[in-house]
Image (cartoon, rainbow, N blue to C red):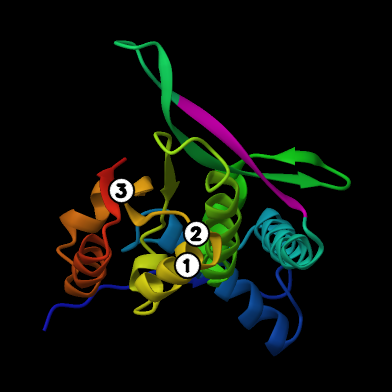
Amino acid sequence: LSTDASIGIAIAPQDGDDHDQLIKNADLAMYAAKSGGRRTHRFFEPTMDASAKARLTMEQDLRQALANGGFELHYQPLVNLGCDRVSGCEALLRWRHPERGMVSPAEFIPIAEDTGLINEIGDWVLRTACMEAATWPDHIRLAVNVSPVQLKNQTLALRIAGALAASGLKPCRLEIEITEAVLIRDDEAALAILHQLRDIGVRIALD
C-alpha cells in the first residue's frame, strides 16, 4: 500500500488562540497544499482565509443567479466557408453579476463544478439553448459544452432527451462537446452516457 499526504500547518498563537480556529486554519493550509500539487505542506497564511470567504461568497452568488435568472447564453457561430453561411452555433454561458458585471467562466465554472451546481446550471443551459435553437433554420446545429462532472450523473442522457422533447429540437441538430479528459480517464460511466446519447441521435464532438 502506497500512501502520501498533504499537510496543513497552523501555529498558535499567531494563527489562532483556540482549538477550533487552529483546526480551521490548518484545514485551509491543507487545501492549499493539495492545490499546490499534493505531497507537500503549507503553513497557514491570512490570505487563505480571505480566499475561502471569497469562494463561499461566489458560491452563494451562483445559487442566487440560478434562482433569479442571472445567467445569459451567447452564441458563437460556425461558418461554412464553402457556401458562406452559418452551419452551427456554440452556446456560451455568461454570468452578469449585479455588482461585479460580467464574470469570466474561468472564474465561476470551477466553483460550480466543485460544488455540484454545474448540474443545475447545465440543465438550464440545455433547456434554454434547445428552446432557442428550435426557432432557428433547420440546417443550423447547436453545440453545448458538457462538463466532466455532468458526465458523472447517470441521468444526464435522460435530461438531454427531456430538453430535446420539451423544445421540439431534433436530436441530430444537437452536438454535445466534451473535453479530452473524459476519454483519457476511460470512465466507463461517462462512456455509457455517450453511447446513450449517440443512440438517440445526438452528435458528440471533442472540444
Give the residue at mark 3.
179
Q: In terms of sequence position, does the residue under pointer 3 or pointer 1 come before the other?
A: 1
Q: Residue at point 58% right, 54% down?
A: 131
Q: Residue 57 at x, y = what percent?
A: 76, 62
Give the residue at mark 2.
168
**Relative to 153, is 54 on the left or the right?**
right
- Disc number lying in front (3 or 1): 1
Quadrant location of residue 2? bottom left
Q: Quadrant of the C terminus?
A: top left
Cα–Cα gap, marks 1 and 2: 5 Å
- Name which residue type carries label 1: Ala
Q: Which secondary structure lies at badge 1?
A: helix
Q: Residue at point 39% right, 34% down?
A: 139
Q: Quadrant of the N terminus?
A: bottom left
Give the residue at mark 1.
165
Cα–Cα gap, marks 3 and 2: 27 Å
Q: Which secondary structure lies at badge 2?
A: loop
The vertical placement of 133 against 55, above or below, is above
- Are discs 3 and 2 less than 8 Å apart at CB? no
Q: Is residue 52 magenta?
A: no
Q: Which mark is residue 83?
A: none
The vertical placement of 129 against 166, above or below, is above
- Name which residue type carries label 3: Thr
User: How many residues crowd mark 1 within 10 Å: few (<14), some (14–19), many (20+)?
Assistant: some
User: How many residues crowd mark 2 within 10 Å: few (<14), some (14–19), many (20+)?
Assistant: some
Q: Residue 158 at x, y = what percent?
A: 39, 75
- Disc number lying in front (3 or 2): 2
Q: Which secondary structure lies at badge 3?
A: loop
- Are discs 1 and 2 less than 8 Å apart at CB? yes
Q: From which residue to which does the magenta span run?
A: 70-77
